[in-house]
Amino acid sequence: MIDFHCHLDLYPKAKEVYAESLRRNAFTWLVTTSPKAFRATSSVLGRHETVLISPGLHPEIVSERFEELDLLTAQIDDAIAVGEIGLDGSKRYAASYLKQKQVFSAAVKRCHDMGGRALSIHSRQAVPDVLELLRLFPDHGVPVLHWFTGTASELKTAIGQGCWFSIGPAAFISSAGKALARKLPRDRVLPESDGPFAQLDGRSVMPWDFDITVALLSDVWSLPFEEVRAQLLSNARMFVNKIGYTKLIKKLI
Ligand SMILES: [Zn+2]
């Protein structure tokens, strides 16, 4: 199994979920929500080549964690991936929007300065601004828009800018979500859980729920399950190769 966007450190029994992920997953991208959480999670869970732990600063907590921005940019220097970062344009976080933009643009700029990173990006109700900041600092690496909920025309622009997309079971609950999933470029889609936040049938989506995403994509793409599964695994190989995480490639074959 594989998971390209997961808050593994935030499950109630994180150590057990981690151990289970090591057993069941060939790859898990653990995105953290703040630079201090990145530090703590890295030391508590330790290093394992199949789990990529990345420093981030989630837009929903920028108002409380803004002073950690310098720590984030320093952590980006030593990372191959960054996330969760991004912008949230919903009303609830309107008061911090300018600070969110400061954080996100500083992070993307640092990725650009450092020659490129993989970025796991939150873009709820803020896709045009996210794409504009990505354009402002080209060669930032490989952007992955996680749980994309923009419009069809925003999706087109994002595809044109070279974005990848990570999607999980919860994104298929609404009919709008299904319609967007149908339009995703098949060779740039990666599976995600977004657990423990993302819920399915009253429980958190788990890092090893890959086949649920495959089944849902197989339905909206009208393709056989095995074909979709092979496509996502091939995308995963392509992606880890692109970001230079080559020690993983063999495990994903
Ligand atoms: Zn997330």
Image (cartoon, helix red, strand yellow):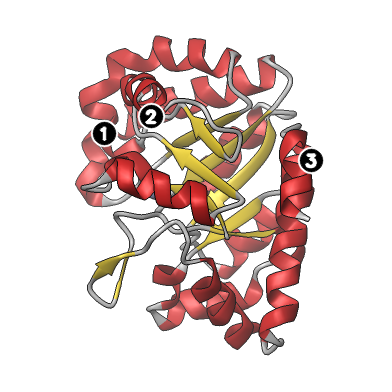
Q: Is residue 7 visible?
A: no
Residue at 61% x, 65% y is: 153
The image shows residue 220 at horizontal and vertical percentages of: 59, 85
Residue 5 point in image, percent of width and height:
49, 49
Which x, y percent locates residue 83? Answer: 48, 35
* Tag count: 3
Numbered badge on residue 61: 1
Element on which disc 1 rests? helix
Q: Label 3 belongs to which residue?
A: 241
Residue bearing mark 2: 57
The image shows residue 90, relative to residue 67, as above or below, that is below
Residue 199 in percent (x, y) is at 30, 66
Label 2 within 8 A of ligand 1 by Cβ: no
Kindly identify the amino acid type of the residue bearing the numbered disc 1. Answer: Ile
Give whichever of discs 3 and 2 has the lower sequence position.
2
Q: For the residue marked with disc 3, what is the amino acid? A: Asn
Disc assigned to residue 21: none
Query: What residue type is disc 2 on?
Result: Leu
Q: Foreground residue, 173 or 215? A: 215
C-alpha gap between disc 2 and disc 1: 7 Å
Query: In which quadrant will I find the C terminus?
Result: bottom right
How far is the residue under mark 1 from the one under mark 3? 31 Å
- Disc 2 and disc 1 in contact, CB within 8 angstroms: yes
Dot 1 alpha-carbon crowd within 10 angstroms: few under 14, some 14 to 19, many 20 or more: some
Residue 112 seen by the camera: yes
Q: Is residue 23 left or right of residue 184?
A: left
Q: CA distance from mark 3 to mark 2?
A: 25 Å
Q: Secondary structure at mark 3?
A: helix
